[in-house]
């Protein structure tokens, strides 16, 4: 990939860490960030939902994991309150966490199931023009027989919020093909102010959840609500699908692997090398081995057995086919 002039504007990174799988993924993320992006000088925030009426039990991270994140990787634990989503819709964490970030300072959100694989400060961000991950499948809407099509469904949402629908379309794709419509994976997104972005994200998500247009009556919003609202937010704030050059995020700079079996099945040798390199030090290994999917996948070699099942140059087109093959061979863990 040809070198491009990188934006050196300082920015912060935020991931969400909480009880369960995400706290271990936060360690993997932080370890890869520090190993592969030594020039990153912003703050790494690990946003942590706090106990409250939206949660049954305590969603906070284990104390030893919090200590490693803070003392080992220089992360700042950022507590936030779940006022609208919580346990019923944990994907809402990525919306509500934004209000705990410093106002008016550029941010880059990542899902915890991401590895940083090269220098993040080389990515030419334009934080005034937000964007998000284009590594996605056409998961929403699910078109129903005799129901509204893609155009009618998406246009109803743009109309609801007074947004220009036509300018969001990629006319290089045919009408009623999902890629024509602005749709992202919420594995990363960025903007110049977390509070402005977060307020728009929250307003749109709540309005869709609580008062959806009739065109959505047959559509599921769980777990898709954040990914339905996200393109509307980005479009409203002057962003889009092409504000970040291709080849960086979800490319040579980061990898959104989703789950470890999928990482071993489909990602490059370079990504596997990063994963196994950053999890090798004994203090990290001791902690991560307390979580079975990491223990067996990385340290007991199950990931390499998964890897041997697939030809990376000839992978199935759909992720579900990967999952089915891994499960059929008894190697699935999450």
Image: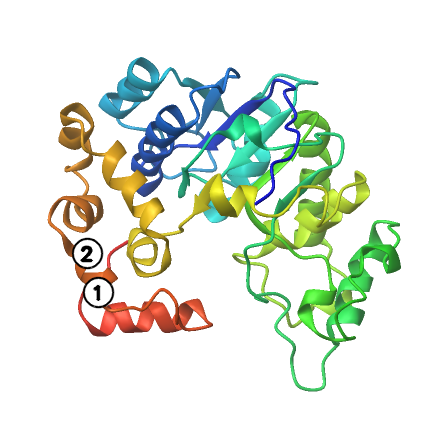
Q: How many marks?
A: 2
- Residue placed furthest toward the front: 2
The residue under label 1 is: 308
Write the residue at 28% across / 42% down: 273
Write the residue at 61% across / 26% down: 107
Scheme of image coloration: rainbow
**Dot 2 and dot 1 residues touching (CB under 8 Å):** yes
Residue 197: quadrant of the picture: top right
Write the residue at 78% across / 67% down: 172
Nearer to us in this view, 4 or 324 = 4
The residue under label 2 is: 304
Residue 58: quadrant of the picture: top left
| Spot occupied by residue 94 in the image (x, y as percentages of width and height) | 54, 37
Q: Secondary structure at mark 2?
A: helix
- Is residue 31 rendered to the left or right of residue 149? left
- Residue placed furthest toward the left: 300
| Spot occupied by residue 22 in the image (x, y as percentages of width and height) | 36, 39
Q: Which mark is residue 241?
A: none
- Is residue 308 rendered to the left or right of residue 322? left
Query: Taking 71 as reference, is 3 above or below it?
Result: below
Q: Residues within 10 Å of mark 2 (few under 14, many from 20)?
A: some
- Is residue 298 rendered to the left or right of residue 236? left
| Spot occupied by residue 287 in the image (x, y as percentages of width and height) | 18, 30
Q: In the picture, which quadrant includes the N terminus?
A: top right
Residue 331: quadrant of the picture: bottom left
Q: CA distance from mark 2 to mark 1?
A: 6 Å
Q: Residues within 10 Å of mark 1 (few under 14, many from 20)?
A: few
Write the residue at 40% across / 18% down: 75
- Is residue 60 rendered to the left or right of residue 205? left
Query: Is residue 112 visible to us here?
Result: yes
């Amino acid at each position: 990939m040809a070198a491009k002039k990188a934006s050196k504007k300082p920015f912060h990174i935020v991931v969400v860490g909480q009880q369960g799988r995400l706290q271990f993924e936060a360690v993997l993320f932080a370890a890869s960030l520090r190993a592969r992006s030594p020039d990153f000088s912003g703050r790494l925030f690990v946003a942590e939902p706090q106990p409250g009426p939206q949660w049954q039990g305590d969603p906070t991270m284990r104390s030893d994991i919090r200590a490693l994140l803070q003392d080992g990787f220089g992360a700042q634990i950022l507590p936030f309150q779940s006022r609208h989503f919580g346990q019923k819709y944990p994907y809402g964490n990525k919306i509500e966490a934004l209000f705990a970030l410093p106002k008016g300072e550029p941010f880059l959100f990542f899902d915890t199931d991401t590895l940083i694989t090269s220098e993040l400060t080389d990515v030419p961000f334009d934080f005034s023009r937000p964007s998000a991950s284009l590594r996605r499948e056409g998961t929403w809407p699910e078109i129903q027989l005799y129901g509204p099509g893609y155009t009618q469904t998406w246009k109803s949402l743009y109309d609801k919020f007074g947004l220009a629908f036509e300018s969001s379309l990629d006319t290089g794709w045919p009408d009623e093909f999902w890629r024509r419509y602005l749709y992202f994976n919420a594995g990363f997104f960025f903007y110049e102010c977390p509070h402005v972005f977060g307020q728009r994200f929250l307003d749109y998500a709540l309005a869709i959840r609580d008062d959806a247009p009739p065109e959505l009556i047959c559509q599921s919003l769980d777990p898709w609500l954040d990914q339905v609202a996200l393109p509307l937010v980005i479009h409203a704030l002057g962003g889009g699908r092409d504000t970040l050059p291709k080849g960086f995020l979800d490319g040579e700079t980061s990898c959104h692997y989703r789950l470890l079996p999928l990482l071993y099945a489909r990602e490059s040798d370079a990504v596997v090398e990063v994963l196994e390199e950053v999890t090798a030090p004994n203090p990290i290994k001791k902690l991560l081995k307390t979580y079975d999917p990491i223990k067996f996948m990385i340290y007991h070699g199950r990931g390499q057995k998964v890897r041997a099942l697939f030809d990376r140059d000839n992978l199935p087109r759909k992720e579900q086919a990967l999952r089915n093959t891994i499960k059929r061979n008894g190697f699935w863990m999450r």
